Image (tube, rainbow, N blue to C red):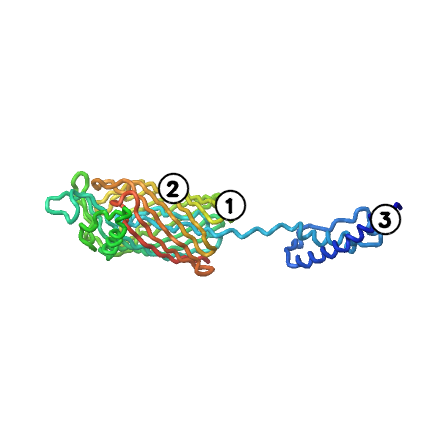
């Protein structure tokens, strides 16, 4: 054999020593690396032509084969799929304005199902202040004045709801609310808040010109027919609400877009001043998308239908549309910040000069306090028209998933 050939063989042998040492070190560092499961179907490659056998070496003991065979399961094993980030979704807050409180409204929510055989329980309370009016002059109306309507009071709804996953994509739910409306105590603090932020253009809707902490809901129709709920304050059960939630597309944990259809119906179970005959029906299409590593977008549109359109002299729009858009930010794995914009079409048809459009801005935080429990905190503020929406509201909720 030529001299250069022997030199090449010697160089190759010399190089194999550090290579084998490096391979051994690599294998030691990969002891905890994932391995293929027993049923993966992978087998060591056969020795082509039995070369190893001819040289008296089994393939597993050959220096050329040992690193390759030991590393092959590691290199061929698929990387484990990362656990999808938790998408908490907007708070399921409804329109609690005194005139809307007895009726079904469609809340913002996530399209994600709870999971087959899983339960979700929610206990929540919403407290808000309502103040809207249209009359010839501000303040307590003098004799002979023309008051089209005045809604002045506070509301509170405490609710319990249970949701169950019938299948991986279908949930059913039941909700029981307890309502209250009355004079309250928030007028004074709200006046102070408005005065402090007057420089920023925050409107007070002429609150200081009216009496504080009174309950008045009254007015007249365009034809001059009066109505009054001013003596109908107090607490009572609301209508039991049944719901179905079907995630018909993108229910997989890592899906970019998820879509769901939601249907709701209320039963006439309310008591006291909240007793309403007939049923309310609602339908909604909801979607969500993962925008980036820490951001999620939620959109929804739907509507309600009231089989009994009149309550104590107030006539409601029988078919009402609604929609929402929400943005969720995950600054940390255990909590989220959510901004939600809600809007709905006309609520009342027979009150003179009643605004035909309602909108709210909700700010909320959802905090995981344990593996199973989550706390919701938030506030709501009206936007475009102050005369037919709650001026200010706060809410708190406790959600358990099992």
Q: Quadrant of residue 359?
A: top left
Answer with left or right where residue 48 lies relative to residue 392.
right
> Rounded to the nearest whole Å, what is the CA distance between mark 2 and mark 1?
21 Å
Q: Is residue 277 visible?
A: no
Looking at the image, the residue that sits furthest to the left is 143
Chain-order first, disc 3 or disc 2: 3
Residue 76, percent from left and from top: 66, 49
- Pointer 1 residue: 255
Q: CA distance from mark 3 to mark 2?
A: 80 Å
The one of 67 and 165 positioned closer to us in this rendering: 67
Side of 45 where 346 appears, left or right: left
Q: Which residue is mark 3?
A: 6
Of helix, strand and loop, which one carries label 1? loop
Q: Secondary structure at mark 3?
A: helix
Discs 3, 2 touching: Cβ within 8 Å: no
Q: Position of residue 380 (x, y in %)?
A: 32, 50
Task: Name the residue at 33% across, 52% down.
Answer: 379
Question: Whole-Å distance between the Cαs marked 1 and 3?
Answer: 60 Å
Q: Position of residue 18 (x, y in %)?
A: 75, 55
| Residue neighbourhood size for the residue with mark 2, other residues' Cα within 10 Å, grouped as few (<14), some (14–19), many (≥20) | many
The extreme right residue here reads 1
Q: Is residue 132 left or right of residue 79?
A: left
Q: Is residue 30 above or below residue 248?
A: below
Q: Residue at x 64, y 59 (%)?
A: 32
SS at mark 2? strand
**Tag of residue 162:** none
User: Which of the labelled discs sits on residue 301, or is there none?
Assistant: 2
Residue 142 image offset from top left, x and y in percent: 12, 47
């Amino acid at each position: 054999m030529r001299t250069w050939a022997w030199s090449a063989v010697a160089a190759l042998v010399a190089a194999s020593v550090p290579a084998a040492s490096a391979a051994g070190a690599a294998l030691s560092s990969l002891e905890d690396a994932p391995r293929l499961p027993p049923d993966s179907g992978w087998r060591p490659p056969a020795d082509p032509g039995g070369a190893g056998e001819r040289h008296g070496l089994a393939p597993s003991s050959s220096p050329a084969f040992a690193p390759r065979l030991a590393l092959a399961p590691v290199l061929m094993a698929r990387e484990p799929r990362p656990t999808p980030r938790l998408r908490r979704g907007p708070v399921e807050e409804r329109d609690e304005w005194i005139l809307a409180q007895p009726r079904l409204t469609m809340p913002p929510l996530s399209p994600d199902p709870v999971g087959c055989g899983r339960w979700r329980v929610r206990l929540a309370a919403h407290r808000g202040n309502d103040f809207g009016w249209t009359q010839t002059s501000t303040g307590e109306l003098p004799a002979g004045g023309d008051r089209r309507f005045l809604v002045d009071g506070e509301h509170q709804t405490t609710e319990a709801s249970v949701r169950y996953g019938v299948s991986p994509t279908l949930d059913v739910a039941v909700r029981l609310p307890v309502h209250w409306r009355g004079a309250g105590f928030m007028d004074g603090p709200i006046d102070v808040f408005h005065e402090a932020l007057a420089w920023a253009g925050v409107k007070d809707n002429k609150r200081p010109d009216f009496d504080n902490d009174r309950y008045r809901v009254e007015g007249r129709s365009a034809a001059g027919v009066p109505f009054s709920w001013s003596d109908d304050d107090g607490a009572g059960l609301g209508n039991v609400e049944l719901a179905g939630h079907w995630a018909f597309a993108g229910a997989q944990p890592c899906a970019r877009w998820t879509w769901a259809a939601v249907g709701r119906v209320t039963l006439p179970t309310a008591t006291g001043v909240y007793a309403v005959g007939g049923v309310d029906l609602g339908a909604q299409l909801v979607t969500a998308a993962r925008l980036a590593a820490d951001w999620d977008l939620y959109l929804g549109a739907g509507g309600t239908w009231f089989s009994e359109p009149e309550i104590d002299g107030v006539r409601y729009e029988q078919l009402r549309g609604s929609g929402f858009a929400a943005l969720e930010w995950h600054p940390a794995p255990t909590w989220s910040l959510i901004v939600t914009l809600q809007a709905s079409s006309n609520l009342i048809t027979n009150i003179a000069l009643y605004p035909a459009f309602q909108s709210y801005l909700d700010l909320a935080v959802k905090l995981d306090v344990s593996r199973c429990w989550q706390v919701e905190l938030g506030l709501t503020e009206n936007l475009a028209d102050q005369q037919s929406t709650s001026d200010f509201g706060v809410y708190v909720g406790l959600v358990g998933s099992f």
